[in-house]
Amino acid sequence: MTWDDAEEIGMALFEKFPERDPLSVRFTDLRRWVMELEGFEGAPQQSSEGKLEAIQMAWYEEWREGRS
């Protein structure tokens, strides 16, 4: 996975943190958690606010569907 794999990262974050509301997570924490995911190979300097927003929204969609 790299920073461009928002959907895959969103699913992985939902599996790791199923009870956490993704919209309550600070980008600093989100960035760290993404880099700690097993299989993540993206370089830290390649992250951006736009990529973190895409990841957060993908995670939110998974979380929302999981709560229905």
Image (cartoon, rainbow, N blue to C red):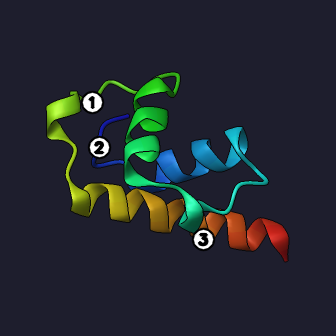
The image shows residue 44 at horizontal and vertical percentages of: 23, 30
Q: Disc 3 and disc 1: Cα gap in Å?
A: 22 Å
Q: Which residue, as the protein is rendered here, is positioned at the far right? A: 68
The image shows residue 21 at horizontal and vertical percentages of: 67, 63
Q: Earlier in the sequence, mark 3 or mark 1?
A: 1
Q: Quick one: label 2, few (<14), some, or many (20+) residues within 10 Å? A: many
The image shows residue 13 at horizontal and vertical percentages of: 59, 45
Q: Quick one: label 3, few (<14), some, or many (20+) residues within 10 Å? A: some
Residue under label 1, please give it: 42
Residue drawn 29% across the image and 43% down it: 3
Q: Secondary structure at mark 1?
A: loop
Residue under label 3, please give it: 61
The image shows residue 8 at horizontal and vertical percentages of: 49, 47
Q: Secondary structure at mark 3?
A: helix
Q: Amino acid at mark 3?
A: Glu
Q: Give above or below for 49 relative to 9.
A: below
Q: Amino acid at mark 2?
A: Trp
The quarter holding residue 54 reads bottom left
Q: Which residue, as the protein is rendered here, is positioned at the far bottom? A: 68
Residue drawn 46% across the image and 61% down it: 56
Horizontal arrangement in the rendering, residue 15 relative to residue 52 (left or right): right
Q: Mark on residue 3?
A: 2
Q: Secondary structure at mark 2?
A: loop
The quarter holding residue 17 reads top right
What is the quadrant of the C terminus in the image? bottom right
> Is the Cβ of the residue at disc 3 closer than 8 Å to that at disc 1?
no
